[in-house]
């Protein structure tokens, strides 16, 4: 394992643990239904809106699995998600309204969909990186990266991150190696001088290998074993949590 100049971290599953909120779709549907009513549209019930939001989220998850087989996948746009995955069969006014409001709706969906908690040991890891002149950064797929930025700002961890790269903001998604290359260019380092840490085989491990990262580390999370396809690439190391990642780093600092 090389001594890295930068540590690129996935958000969900690495920096934070996430837990799905069962009521998220009903809460979002109620807000969308109210928004439609303010615009004078009354042609959909709240339960119909909720059903289509859930269907759109399910279709989006299938799409995400399919992109992990592509060499250089692009990211879903906010407008595309609401216009084509949620509201495809809605009356014109309702579809036009949620398409126009797609970005704030994606942000609200991200806020409601999951509870987040910083993984134990992450603060210690980032403090050690600062002490040893290793620059941490975020490289993460996201329907709305603003939600992640807000969370990191609220927890104070944004001050530890040299750069944050989110797929919806840059237009490409892992395993597209451009995600890692964007961060490397921003940090002024070669991909061979960074570690990339993620929790998925088909998106993160593949992305690190394609980008030529100096090391790709798999951090185990709830979603690690949910692999939609066989993956040929293998991580350089596997750790259980941020403490395990810190131990790996400490070996390179001796």
Image: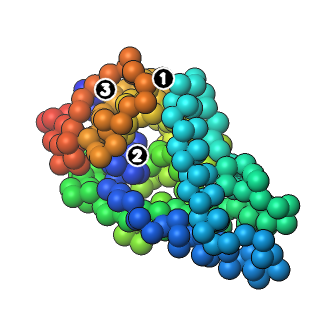
* Residue 216 placement (x, y as % from top left): 34, 30
Q: Secondary structure at mark 1?
A: helix
Q: Would residue 172 appear left or right of 224 to someone viewing this image?
A: right
Quarter assignment of residue 123: bottom left
Q: CA distance from mark 2 to mark 3?
A: 14 Å
Please determine whether, in this image, residue 78 is positioned above or below residue 190: below
Q: Would residue 8 appear left or right of 130 to someone viewing this image?
A: right
* Residue 237 placement (x, y as % from top left): 24, 29
Residue picked out by circle 3: 235
Q: Residue at x 38, y 31 (%)?
A: 227
Compare residues 133 and 231 and report the one nearer the observer.
Answer: 231
Q: Residue at x 85, y 61 (%)?
A: 92
Q: Secondary structure at mark 2?
A: loop
Label 2 with label 3: CB-CB less than 8 Å: no
Q: CA distance from mark 1 to mark 2?
A: 16 Å
Q: Would residue 153 appear left or right of 119 to someone viewing this image?
A: right
């Amino acid at each position: 394992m090389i001594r890295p100049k930068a540590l690129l971290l996935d958000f969900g599953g690495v920096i934070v643990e996430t837990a799905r909120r069962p009521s998220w779709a009903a809460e979002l549907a109620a807000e969308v239904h109210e928004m439609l009513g303010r615009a004078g549209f009354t042609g959909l019930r709240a339960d119909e809106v909720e059903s289509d939001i859930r269907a759109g989220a399910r279709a989006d998850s299938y799409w995400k699995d399919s992109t992990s087989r592509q060499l250089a996948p692009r990211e879903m746009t906010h407008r595309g998600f609401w216009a084509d995955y949620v509201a495809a069969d809605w009356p014109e006014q309702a579809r036009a309204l949620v398409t126009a409001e797609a970005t704030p709706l994606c942000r609200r969906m991200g806020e409601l969909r999951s509870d987040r908690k910083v993984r134990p040991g992450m603060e210690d890891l980032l403090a050690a990186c600062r002490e040893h002149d290793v620059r941490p950064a975020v490289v993460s797929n996201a329907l709305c990266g603003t939600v992640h930025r807000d969370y990191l700002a609220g927890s104070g961890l944004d001050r530890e991150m040299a750069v944050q790269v989110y797929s919806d903001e840059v237009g490409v998604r892992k395993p597209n190696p451009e995600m890692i290359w964007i961060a490397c260019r921003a940090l002024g380092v070669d991909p061979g001088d960074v570690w990339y840490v993620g929790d998925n085989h088909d998106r993160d491990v593949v992305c690190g290998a394609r980008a030529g990262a100096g090391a790709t580390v798999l951090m185990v999370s709830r979603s690690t074993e949910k692999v939609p396809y066989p993956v040929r690439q293998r991580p350089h190391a596997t750790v259980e949590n941020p403490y395990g990642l810190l131990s790996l780093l400490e070996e390179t600092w001796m």
